[in-house]
């Protein structure tokens, strides 16, 4: 059975140049979870939407989160601890919603969860992300039980910082799914 990959953009969604959008065009079977409000998200609404998508999947799912969506996954896992259908998650550029640098307008995403996630996770963090310090990224990866992968000077690991196709990220997704379409050739 094929694993369903759910794409979870963060605040403001992921534009055309973003690696999540490019992966959707490049690979088969990826599905973006559409949220009702990308500009001023409410954690309760986002968690419910994610839960609907996971519940609707025929088999196991792998979650691919960027930025605020990493926090979304931790909130979802707290509310739905059974999480049996989730095979793993790729957590990219987690935002520290408690930091002064985090944009205003979101509600319900603080405090940051430090609860261990009940499925395997790989967290990718940049050494110069404006929305999370290296120290906080390490703290989150340890708390969540994530394998931590550092990317040097990658900003927020998005389209604006040159992360379009991002084949190295797809290789990390291969580790979670086992699906050969994500392997570097």
Image (cartoon, helix red, strand yellow):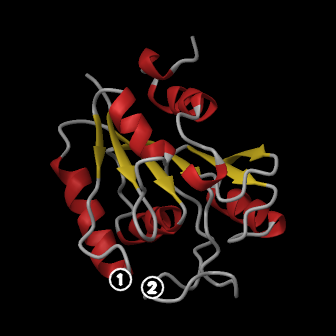
The image shows residue 130 at horizontal and vertical percentages of 72, 70
Instruction: From the viewer's perspective, tell me whether residue 70 is left or right of residue 100.
Output: left
Q: Is residue 146 visible?
A: no
Q: Where is residue 157 in the image (x, y as percent from the top left)?
A: 63, 52
Q: Position of residue 11 (x, y in %)?
A: 45, 70
Q: Is mark 2 on a helix, strand or loop?
A: loop
Quadrant, the C terminus = top right
Q: Which residue is situated farthest in the top direction here? A: 185
Earlier residue among tags 1 and 2? 1
- Badge 1 crowding class, 10 Å Cα cut-off, few under 14, some 14 to 19, many 20 or more, is some
Q: In which quarter of the image is the N terminus?
A: top left
Q: Which residue is drawn at 42% across and 69% down?
A: 12
Quarter of the image for residue 72 reads bottom left
Image coords of residue 122 (percent x, y): 61, 44
Residue at 29% x, 76% y is 37
- Looking at the rendered structure, which numbered label has been put on residue 69? none
Badge 2: how crowded within 10 Å, few (<14), some, or many (20+)?
Answer: some
- How many discs mark residues in the rendered view? 2
Answer left or right for 72 relative to 55.
right
Label 1: state its secondary structure: loop
Name the side, left or right, on which 45 lies relative to 20.
Answer: left
Residue at which label 1 appears: 42
107 left or right, relative to 33? right
Query: Could you say which is closer to the camera, residue 55 or residue 110?
Result: 110
Q: Which residue is drawn at the image coordinates 35% and 83% (left, top)?
A: 42
- The reply to whether the C-beta atoms of the residues labelled 1 and 2 are less than 8 Å apart is yes
**Residue holding disc 2:** 106
Q: In which quarter of the image is residue 31?
A: top left
Q: Residue at x 63, y 45 (%)?
A: 162
Q: Is residue 43 above or below residue 31?
A: below
Residue 81 vs 84, above or below: the answer is below
């Amino acid at each position: 059975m094929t694993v369903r990959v759910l794409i979870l953009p963060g605040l403001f969604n992921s534009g055309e140049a973003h690696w999540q959008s490019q992966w959707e065009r490049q690979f088969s079977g990826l599905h973006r979870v559409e949220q009702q409000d990308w500009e001023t998200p409410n954690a309760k609404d986002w968690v419910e939407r994610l839960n609907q998508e996971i519940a609707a999947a025929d088999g196991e799912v792998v979650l691919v989160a960027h930025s605020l969506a990493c926090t979304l996954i931790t909130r979802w896992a707290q509310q739905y601890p059974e999480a049996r259908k989730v095979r793993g998650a790729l957590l990219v550029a987690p935002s520290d919603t408690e930091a002064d640098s985090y944009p205003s307008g979101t509600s319900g995403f603080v405090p940051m969860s430090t609860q261990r996630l009940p499925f395997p996770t790989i967290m990718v963090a940049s050494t110069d992300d404006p929305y999370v310090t290296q120290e906080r990224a390490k703290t989150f990866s340890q708390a969540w039980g994530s394998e931590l992968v550092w990317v040097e000077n990658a900003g927020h690991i998005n389209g604006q910082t040159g992360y379009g196709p991002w084949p190295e990220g797809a290789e990390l997704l291969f580790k979670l799914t086992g699906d050969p379409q994500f392997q570097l050739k």
